[in-house]
Image (cartoon, rainbow, N blue to C red):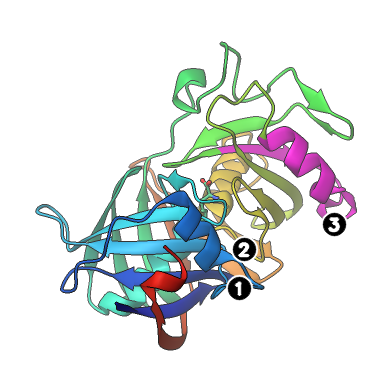
């Protein structure tokens, strides 16, 4: 059985997109996801995205990290699917309903409302998510925000100087985070500009993370470090984030279709 796919990315955070709305596909196990995402043996991607029909939304988006785990949200993939759908669209995800719209800067996504309660992150036990009394080596007193998926955010003088390859892996799997966590390290350049690197749960270091940019922007705004409209510079490029008076986050940025292809299901199942 041959399966068609579209390879897409948002600022270098890349996806294999499988559209099952018209052509059903066999159920996919974690081994199949890992094999497809593998950059040496498979097609290679940070996330595998499966599109399904949905009664309430234009489409349902299921998101699998490269390690095979299914997760709730992916900001860059939301823009990529917004590009595929072309018109204003709604996308149902495990993290909630989001909306996309073509925009002069690419695709704008209404990412919904952030959550700050310790058990909504979730954390293993109660604490103030605006100044968490914890630390790992040079990374201390983070904030935590759930924007559909869980994020911890550290503000540092120089995000590039942090050994995120080692600390990211350690923090992601710390027992404080029962669902594991995405680890964001950010520097504030001025009241409208952040620099961000992200260690993604289930993937590792990526060129960009849309939900990471949203969570970090909201954390900076909540701390009074920036205005409520910022540019977040990631290794793959900038994203524009606003946190409106209505408590909703909007993320705007580019998305790219790289190529289309197909694979034999039997090679990966
Ligand atoms: N790349 C994504 C986030 C993907 C999911 C994340 N790794 C998680 O486990 O929650 C983005 O652009 O938001």
**Mark-to-mark CA distance, 2 and 1:** 6 Å
Residue 208 is tagged as: 2
Q: The residue tagged with tag 3: helix, strand or loop?
A: helix
Which stretch did the figure color magenta? Answer: 151-172
**Mark-to-mark CA distance, 3 and 2:** 14 Å
Dot 2 or dot 1: first in sequence order is 1
Between 148 and 114, the residue placed more toward the observer is: 148
For ligand 1, tell me if the residue under mark 2 lies within 8 Å. yes
**21 in relation to 172, above or below:** below
- Give the residue furthest to the top: 126
Name the quarter where the N terminus is drawn: bottom left
Q: What's the residue at 53%, 34% (across, down)?
A: 145
Residue 12 is tagged as: 1
**178 in relation to 38, above or below:** above
Q: Which quarter of the picture shows residue 101?
A: bottom left
Q: Is residue 104 visible?
A: no
Q: What's the residue at 67%, 32% (across, down)?
A: 173
Q: What's the residue at 44%, 45% (across, down)?
A: 71
Q: Is residue 139 visible?
A: yes
Between 186 and 47, the residue placed more toward the observer is: 47
């Amino acid at each position: 059985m041959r399966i068609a796919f579209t390879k897409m990315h948002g600022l270098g955070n890349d996806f294999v997109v499988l559209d099952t709305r018209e052509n059903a596909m066999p159920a996919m196990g974690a081994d199949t996801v890992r094999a497809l995402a593998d950059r040496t043996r498979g097609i290679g991607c940070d996330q595998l995205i499966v599109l399904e029909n949905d009664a309430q939304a234009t489409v349902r988006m299921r998101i699998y990290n490269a390690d095979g785990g299914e997760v709730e949200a992916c900001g860059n993939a939301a823009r990529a699917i917004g590009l595929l759908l072309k018109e204003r669209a709604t996308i149902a995800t495990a993290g909630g309903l989001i909306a996309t719209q073509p925009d002069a800067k690419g695709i704008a996504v209404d990412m919904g409302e952030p959550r700050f309660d310790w058990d909504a992150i979730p954390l293993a036990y109660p604490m103030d998510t605006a100044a968490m009394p914890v630390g790992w080596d040079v990374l201390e007193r983070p904030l935590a925000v759930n924007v559909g998926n869980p994020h911890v955010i550290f503000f540092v003088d120089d995000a590039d100087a942090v050994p995120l390859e080692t600390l990211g892996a350690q923090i992601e799997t710390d027992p404080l985070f029962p669902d594991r966590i995405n680890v964001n390290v950010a520097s504030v350049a001025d009241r409208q500009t952040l620099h961000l690197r992200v260690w993604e749960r289930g993937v590792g270091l990526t060129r960009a993370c849309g939900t990471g940019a949203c969570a970090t922007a909201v954390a900076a705004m909540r701390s009074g470090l920036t205005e409520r409209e910022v540019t977040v510079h990631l290794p793959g490029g900038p994203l524009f984030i606003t946190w409106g008076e209505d408590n909703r986050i909007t993320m705007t940025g580019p998305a790219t279709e790289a190529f289309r292809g197909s694979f034999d299901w039997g090679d990966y199942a």
